[in-house]
Image (cartoon, grey):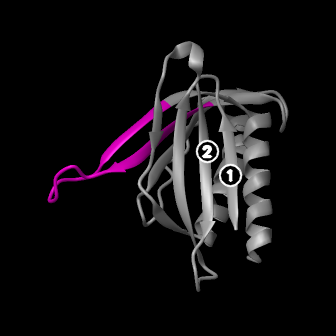
Amino acid sequence: MVSKCFLETDGYQIIFELNSVENSRELVSLVIELRLEPQLGEMLVRSIPSAIALPNLQRLVSYFEQHIAALKVDPNYESPVFLTNGLGFQMQALAGEFFTEVEGNCNIRVMLNVGKPTQGYASTYIGGESVVEFAQIHSFISVIQVALQEIGWN
């Protein structure tokens, strides 16, 4: 199984590439790509491959759903940073504008673990922050949910 989940922001695109892990029903391999919008310049960054537990993918879906609900009450709300045990990426949903559950936007900050050039030091993270529409978030989490169903999880 290979699934690509796209999250389009105003300034860049985030692509989650999920691959089955042989003999595992709880993990998938994950590589994340961050592509800058061409009119802003040329940049393409890929994370190092990492494993992500399927419950963490479901937790990412809930993270975005809860963030949108929180913006209804407080447009300045910032969710805590979303992390997984593998530390392949960091994601944070920030303040935004809520009109309805499907209309509105928020800023999103994404940092990708691109590896360690020198052993003994912490990993290097590269990322971006931009505005994302709720419709794009819903599309992204829908594709993640389909991937989870295809894997047979949940």
Residue closer to the observer: 13 or 102: 13
Against 133, residue 26 (above or below) is below
> Could you say where residue 76 lies in the image, as x and y percent from the top left?
59, 29
At 79% from the left and 52% from the top, the residue drawn is: 142
Q: Decide: marks 2, 1 in contact (CB < 8 A)?
A: yes
Give the magenta part as a residue range: 107-128
Residue closer to the observer: 114 or 63: 114
For badge 1, the amino acid type reads: Lys
Q: Which residue is mark 2?
A: 15
Image quarter in which the N terminus is found = bottom right
Which numbered circle lies on residue 4?
A: 1
Using the rendered view, name the quadrant where residue 9 is placed: top right
Against 59, residue 47 (above or below) is above
Residue closer to the observer: 40 or 57: 40
- Label 2 CA crowd tier, 10 Å (few <14, some 14–19, many 20+): some
At 59% from the left and 40% from the top, the residue drawn is: 14
At 58% from the left and 19% from the top, the residue drawn is: 38
